[in-house]
Image (tube, helix red, strand yellow):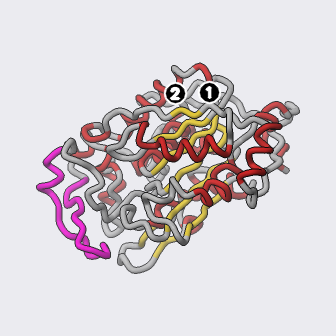
Amino acid sequence: MKRNIALGLVGLSLIWVPAAFSMEALIERQKEDKTLPIVFLHGLSQKGSDMNNSVELLQQMVPGTKIFTPDLEDQGFLPCDIVTRHAANTLNAIPELKDGFNLIGYSLGGLIARSVVESGLLKSRVYSLETLGSPHRGVCGIIYAWDDKIDEAFQKLCKCNPFARLEKKVYKVAYNQDLQNSSCAANLWDDPSKQEEYRKNNLFLPLLNNETPHKNEACFKHNLTTLSVLLALAAKKDTTLEPWQSGMFDYVTKDFKTYEHLKETDMYVDLGLKELDDHNRLLRIPLKGQDHSTIRIDKKVYIEHIVPNLIRRSKVEDDTGKDFYEELQ
């Protein structure tokens, strides 16, 4: 897949909206200062209309903002890089996004959203990227979150994972190249006890996370650091995303008993996450009372986290022309 370096960085005046806003205050602020358009990407085996209840919450808090919920290419039989390319083409065809936009992704949609940003395939700049329960580090315990459209080969290649809290079936040979080339789901498999095999045979995630050398790693890192904010929300009661810590870039270790913090990994530096973190543009937030399905429809989550971190028009218009990093210092 062709990867291009994103366009030059744009200076912003980062005057953040306080996180403790009530809905009334959010709406009042919106009257004075319009939010950039929002794209909301759905999860595995869903479609754009499945995000309608999430969009309704957003519309209440940011009235008048354009919100788009495109359908991603059918993930059942396509790898994540193809879905990424389709998503980029879809977004590039929306004229309202030409001056930049906010990007939100739920579950797999958040991973595809990050892939779209890193790939450099977009014609417009993404200012904020917000992910809700997304498998940034992959998964090592998957329940049946898909439907009959998914290749029956997965059904035949399952076994029980000892790490799973319940009797859940997971992929036995997800690193099979035919499966890697035919489904997003296989691209998510990251067995912590088989890291050499994972880095060698998973055709998507190790590249996206700059965990293995590849020709586009510098581009991926650069493009991710152009974000004004990267918000990663993870639900502590998430039993679909295993481990749930993957939603905030942490992961389980090879003994399946302890967890590896993002800052302990090479990808923290190699992917540009440290650079974002150093400038207070990386937010990783665990949510105590949420599970995989409620994280995207809880009003409190929107008021406290999602809406305050959307980029508003004034922050774009206040550009002084200075270097982006100087503006943050």
Q: How many numbered marks have been drawn onto this rendered protein structure?
A: 2
- Residue 250 point in image, percent of width and height: 50, 65
Residue 27 coordinates in the image, percent (x, y): 74, 45
Residue lying at the far left of the rendered structure: 156
Whether 109 is drawn above or below 261: the answer is: above
Residue at left offset 55%, top offset 22%: 94
Q: Is residue 210 left or right of residue 144?
A: right
Between 300 and 179, the residue placed more toward the observer is: 300
Q: Residues within 10 Å of mark 2 (few under 14, many from 20)?
A: many
Residue 91 tag number: 2
CA separation in Å, label 1 and label 2: 9 Å
Residue corresponding to mark 1: 124
Instruction: Say if the magenta span includes residue 105.
Output: no
Q: Which residues are magenta?
A: 151-174
Q: Nearer the viewer, residue 265 or 79?
A: 79
Residue drawn 79% across and 40% down?
324
* Apparent side of residue 305 relative to residue 104 in the rendered image (left or right): right
Lateral position of residue 17 relative to residue 5, left or right: right
Please identify, in this view, whether the residue under mark 1 or under mark 2 is nearer the observer.
2
As shown in the figure, which amino acid type bears the numbered disc 1? Ser
Seen from this angle, which residue lies furthest right?
Answer: 320
Is 80 left, or right, of 115 in this rendering? left
